[in-house]
Amino acid sequence: MIEKTFQNPLLDFGADPWVFKDRDYYYFMVTRSTKIDLWKSKTLSGIAQGNCKTIWTAPEEGINCANVWAPEIHKINGSWYIYFTANDGKSGDLSRKVFVLENTSDPFNGVWEEKGFVNTEHSGLDGTVFEHKGKLYFVYAGYGNFPDYGSALYIAEMENPWTLKGTNVLISKPEFDWEKQGGMAINEGPVMLKRKNKLCLIYSASATWSDDYCLGMLTGLADKDVLDTNSWMKSEQPVFKKSIENQVFAPGHNSFTLSPDETEDWIIYHAISESEGGSEHRSTRIQKFTWNSDGTPNFGIPLPIATPIPVPSGE
């Protein structure tokens, strides 16, 4: 039997990729500047060739009319939510917020309603959500501490999928040299990876245009209070970084999913194929990853483009 394979990149211009698996379908999103597009596919390796639909377009003016970045689709209590970053096109970082769309039926055919922006204490970007012990939590990259660093990670409990309650707790700020490359000290793009009794909050570090943009990790035990800064331990080294040998630079801003038969774990991320190639050349890639004996993920080394890779199990 001939083994089916695919090659990276899946999408040549695909920054900030997000994949969500719901039963037999994958939903896929990337940054599209002034609109939000949604792809739907039965295969992970073929997500960029799936059905694609524009589900929201930025208004010509207003608080969310420009710089639409990093959309994420989530399913919460049977309804669908998309979190995305935008600003007013005038005030820069000061007006950057995380906005929410809600769809109570079908993500491809239902109506998406704007719920406004999440009431974070700081302006910021890259909002994500996760459920833990029956509660919903929001994590985002917040500004507010220039010039020491550009952004840091904050967490807060949610009253509902678009409203925070309580304090925004700082859980990670740039501390190591590998978090301060490219002229800016940055923690951004958080995403939760849960397995057994361990919480692994993966995030992107350094400037996205830098060769050394990479992934860091905070780990916490499931029985600890996630709103307690001391519950999180930061890895002292990146958990996923550039490979000069494989000509992969600036790998980061990722998401996670399972193979169609749910026997394999896959990371979806963007990277650049040329040193100092510029953030406009970020492309979407995927690869399988494994787990270490301590319950943390082992992402390995970014694979070179145009290399045959076995398709996810079940395709």
Image (spheres, rainbow, N blue to C red):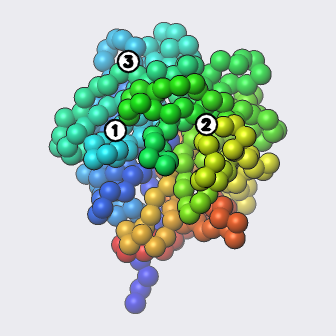
198 with respect to 28 (left or right): right
Residue type at numbered disc 2: Leu
Q: Is residue 208 above or below residue 220?
A: above
Spot occupied by residue 36 in the image (x, y as percentages of width and height) = 34, 34
Whole-percent x, y for residue 47 in the image: 36, 56
Q: Which one is nearer the viewer's eye here, 274 or 230?
A: 230
Whether residue 246 sits left or right of residue 46 in the image: it is right
Label 2: few (<14), some (14–19) or many (≥20) C-alpha neighbours in 10 Å: some
The residue carrying mark 3 is 65
Q: Looking at the image, tell me whether mark 1 or mark 2 is earlier in sequence order.
A: 1
Question: Which of pointers 3 and 1 lies earlier in the amino acid sequence?
Answer: 3
- The amino acid pointed to by label 1 is Tyr
296 horizontally vs 32: left or right? right
Q: Which is closer to the viewer, label 3 or label 2?
A: 2
Q: Label 2 near label 1: C-beta < 8 Å? A: no
37 or 146: nearer the viewer: 146
Give the vertical position of 157 relative to 66 (above or below).
Answer: below
Q: Distance of mark 1 from mark 2, alpha carbons?
A: 23 Å
Q: Residue at x 38, y 32 (%)?
A: 160
Which callout, 1 or 2, points to the residue nearer the camera? 2
Q: Which is in the foreground here, disc 3 or disc 1?
A: 1
Q: Mark 2 or mark 3, which is nearer the start of the sequence?
A: 3
Q: Mark 2 highlights which residue?
A: 227
* Residue 211 x, y percent position in the rendering: 70, 43
Element carrying mark 2: loop
Residue marked by disc 1: 81
x then y, percent, for residue 210:
69, 38
